[in-house]
């Protein structure tokens, strides 16, 4: 059975035999004509200012494969493949191989529930790379195992995704205790759960921490899923959730050579209202500058979230061994560490970041290749 | 004359002789105690969960230099320098050397009105570096002159600001016409005014285009101040401005190895309602996916903005010579180029990006150093 076409004043309606209905405004059809895209670069070259907003066609027609729109006698008709136009119905989310449903997790996951993937497989096979990318995106966290004892080994895995995200701490960084630290990570103190670099306009996406040595007493790694915490807060205390997802607060990092500041909400939502990001870092929270009347509601909501991150119902702990690398979405999963005693052994992690954009791009390109 | 102190149930009020009044909630004072910050890293180490939200002090007192808050018999009182606490009154914008009032410009600026700064001065003197950073941020555009004939010369200037922003086009890029382009910039076609990489979650901030050769016929550079266009649109057609600053639309770049997508508004506003960003790139605008009823209002507003960018009232054109480098805020100033004829001579620009975060950080650090 063929779909049916109904041409109106502003656009056409197509009804497919399976009940799907699409409404396609004429100006959208003109702007979306496949002939208006550059044959090599795929970029739109059609110039919207060259047609009137209320453009109407001379004729519209359905063939067995296509919708054909004839604009005027002199121009080539626009031709839209019927499957393509069904998938691109205005008002529908576009299919996206990177749009994976997240698995929110709590303490019950345990260190043993964290997805584990082998480094050699990831570097050697696109299928293994894709499976690891998907798992890590769904859980926000994974462990890569079997890395050789070289800082290059972790970077090789990271570069399978895309280029590294440089920050003021460099392209890569060493987490060891340092004599003159500019950051608490570089001490042997415990670090409560946090997300990194909330003072940046775009905090780094995925963080890679390759464990080269972890022989000191203590120094376990702790994680909690900010998505689970935020969703539970939304259910439990909608008012606190509202404050944290709408009120922007200042973050700042400064040392002798930098002073990087950004204002943002602690919880960010995407255009569909889903939690897209957690920015939670008490160390980098700048002196609060809200109006006095906003202070108490903010502190109440913020303290509530902070207490939830400490709640044993959410956190997991694991002690990385040499040759393991933890990979997590720094904009979703909070990380921390237990204090360690540097006199009892060496603790050395080598870190880098790859942003979410590169992660999602790789998921899409692998999916495209897998579909041939 | 001394300020006066009035302690209430939730906080203290301080009135300065010059009429300034500050309200300081107790929970804010406890959270902001200078002793709660790490002496070396400057990061907050005070743990908010350790005190009740409704904390009240045993005593508050003004000395000639400080506000002193005594919490309880066992703990060291919090001590706030009076000048410091006046500058950090809740509800006041924090002084920020990077918060420079922008100069919105239109065609009358002309190519000759673009601020020009000398490369050797920028690389050799912090004062010259600061003056150039300020000018470029205020106008969104400057020309650096006197670069030697080496791609390194432009990068040296860029690295005076901070590290380069890598993208899928590399850490640096060459704008020349290429046989198999993945981007219209790499053809000899005219490029209408646009901002780069709107398909990235964070489009690159400042763009550096170092001209090594521009001997072909044509190939002039064009610019327009997106801030001026947006502010004029806000005044002229508030409804269009509202649509463009609230409706998110999809952007996408894809080639054989990447597929990077992002959704954003064409005009972004900061928390004070000021225009903070323009994302305008018809080439990277993905197939529009708005609901059918949203299509016409969006196309109307978008087309309006697009026509304004073509209006001679806004644009300036200049032809860069070898040894000149144009530097502009890619998230504010639109750039384009006139077509050129590659058979008449060589045109070669070498480009890179440095993000706004690094720019603002350098402004603050230079300002701090200048104040001693």
Image: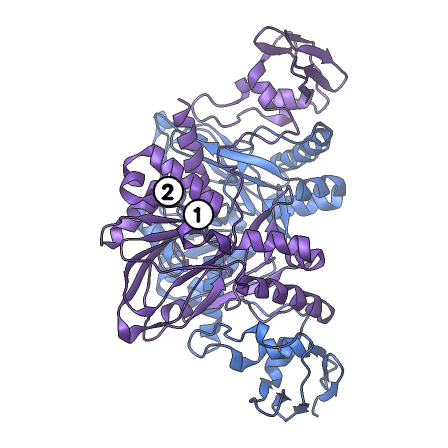
Chain colours: A blue, B purple
Residue B50 x/y as whole percent = 63, 23
Q: Quadrant of residue A121?
A: bottom left
Q: Residue at x 53, y 17 (%)?
A: B35
Q: Classify residue A302 by image quadrant.
A: top right
Kindly indicate whether the residues beneath marks 1 and 2 are on one polypeptide chain.
yes
The quadrant of the image that shows the N terminus of chain A is bottom right
| Residue B103 visible within the image | yes
Q: In which chain is the residue bearing label 1? A: B
Q: Which residue is mark 2?
A: B162
In the displayed structure, does residue A163 sit left or right of residue A220? left
Residue A140 at x, y = what percent?
54, 51
Few, some or many C-alpha atoms within 10 Å of disc 2 (few <14, some 14-19, many ≥20)?
many
Task: Give whichever of A36, B56 is nearer the camera.
Answer: A36
Classify mark 1: residues with Cα within 10 Å, few (<14), some (14-19) or many (20+). Answer: many
Q: Quadrant of residue A81?
A: bottom right
- Of the two numbered discs 1 and 2 on the same chain, state the one appearing first in sequence: 2
The residue under the point 38% across, 32% down is A257
Mark 2 falls on what kind of element? loop
Contact between marks 1 and 2 (CB within 8 A): the answer is yes
- Looking at the picture, tell me which residue is in the foreground, B226 or A326: B226
Q: Which residue is mark 1?
A: B355
The residue nearer to you, when weighing A25 against A211, is A25
Circle on res. B25: none
Q: Secondary structure at mark 1?
A: loop
Residue drawn at 73 percent across, 12 percent down: B6
């Amino acid at each position: 059975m063929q779909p049916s076409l109904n041409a109106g004043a502003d656009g056409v309606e197509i009804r497919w035999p399976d009940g799907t209905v699409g409404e396609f405004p004429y100006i959208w059809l003109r702007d979306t004509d496949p002939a208006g895209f550059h044959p090599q670069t795929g970029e739109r070259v059609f110039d919207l200012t060259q047609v009137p907003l209320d453009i109407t066609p001379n004729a519209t027609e359905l063939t067995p494969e296509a919708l054909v729109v004839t604009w005027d006698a002199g121009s080539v008709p626009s031709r839209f493949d019927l499957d393509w136009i069904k998938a691109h119905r205005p008002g529908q989310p576009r299919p996206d191989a990177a749009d994976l449903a997240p698995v929110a997790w709590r303490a019950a996951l345990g260190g043993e529930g964290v997805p584990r993937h082998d480094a050699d497989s990831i570097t050697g096979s696109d299928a293994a790379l894709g499976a690891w990318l998907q798992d890590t995106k769904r859980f926000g966290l994974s462990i890569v195992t079997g890395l050789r004892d070289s800082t290059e080994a972790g970077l090789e895995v990271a570069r399978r995704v895309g280029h590294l995200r440089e920050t003021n701490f460099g392209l890569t960084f060493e987490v060891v205790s340092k004599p003159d630290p500019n950051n608490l990570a570089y001490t042997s103190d415990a670090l409560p759960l946090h997300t990194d670099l909330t003072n940046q306009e775009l905090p780094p996406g995925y963080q890679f921490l390759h464990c080269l040595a972890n022989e000191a007493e203590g120094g376990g790694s702790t994680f909690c899923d900010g998505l689970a915490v935020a969703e539970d807060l939304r259910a439990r205390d909608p008012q606190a959730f509202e404050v944290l997802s709408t009120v922007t607060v200042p973050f700042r990092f400064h040392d002798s050579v930098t002073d990087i500041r950004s204002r943002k909400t602690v919880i960010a939502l995407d255009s569909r209202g889903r939690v897209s990001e957690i920015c939670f870092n008490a160390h980098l929270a700048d002196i609060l500058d809200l109006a006095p009347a906003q202070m108490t509601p903010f502190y109440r909501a913020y303290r509530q979230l902070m207490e939830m991150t400490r709640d044993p119902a959410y956190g997991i702990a694991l002690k990385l061994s040499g040759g393991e690398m933890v990979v997590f979405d720094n904009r979703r999963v909070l990380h921390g560490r237990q204090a360690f005693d540097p006199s009892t052994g060496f603790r050395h992690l080598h870190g880098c970041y790859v942003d979410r954009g590169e992660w999602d791009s790789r998921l899409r390109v692998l999916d495209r290749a897998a579909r041939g």
